[in-house]
Amino acid sequence: MKYLILLGVISAVLWWLKTQRNSNNSAQDASPQPQNMVRCSYCDLHLPQGDALQGSQGFYCSSAHRSAKEG
């Protein structure tokens, strides 16, 4: 009888560990999608397109670089 209880406890622990691992994997799958990288037309710095400022002559890493290049 004690071996049956021990087998039940071990099975419960293994099942719990498996469900914890699956929930951690699903949280990692919800990570954001990669963005396109663009280059600053002034200093050639590469940055994600979502962080870049767009001007008439391309993308810029800051408003200072945009105003320096475009006037």
Image (cartoon, rainbow, N blue to C red):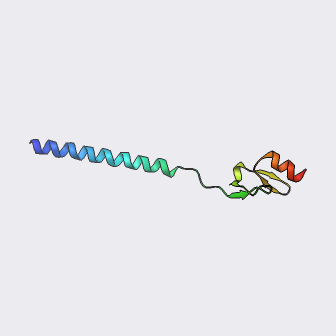
Q: Residue at x 74, y 50 (%)?
A: 52
- Quadrant of residue 20 within the rendered picture: top left
**Residue 4: percent from left, percent from top:** 13, 45
Residue drawn where x is 41% and y is 46% of the image: 23
Taking 32 as reference, is 14 left or right?
Answer: left
Seen at 25% across and 44% down, the residue is 12
Q: Toward the viewer: 27 or 43?
A: 43
Q: Is residue 42 above or below residue 27?
A: below
Horizontal and vertical percent for residue 61?
A: 75, 50
Q: Is residue 40 left or right of residue 35?
A: right
Q: Is residue 15 above or below residue 35?
A: above
Q: Is residue 33 left or right of residue 61?
A: left
Numbered marks: total = 0
Which residue is drawn at the image coordinates 11% and 45% (left, top)? 3
The percent position of residue 33, horizontal first and vertical second, equals 59, 54
Find the residue positioned furthest to the left: 1
The reply, left or right, for residue 43 in relation to residue 31 is right
Q: Residue furthest right?
A: 71
The quadrant in which the N terminus is found is top left
Residue 31 or residue 43, whichever sits in front = 43
On the image, the x and y values in percent for residue 67 come to: 86, 48
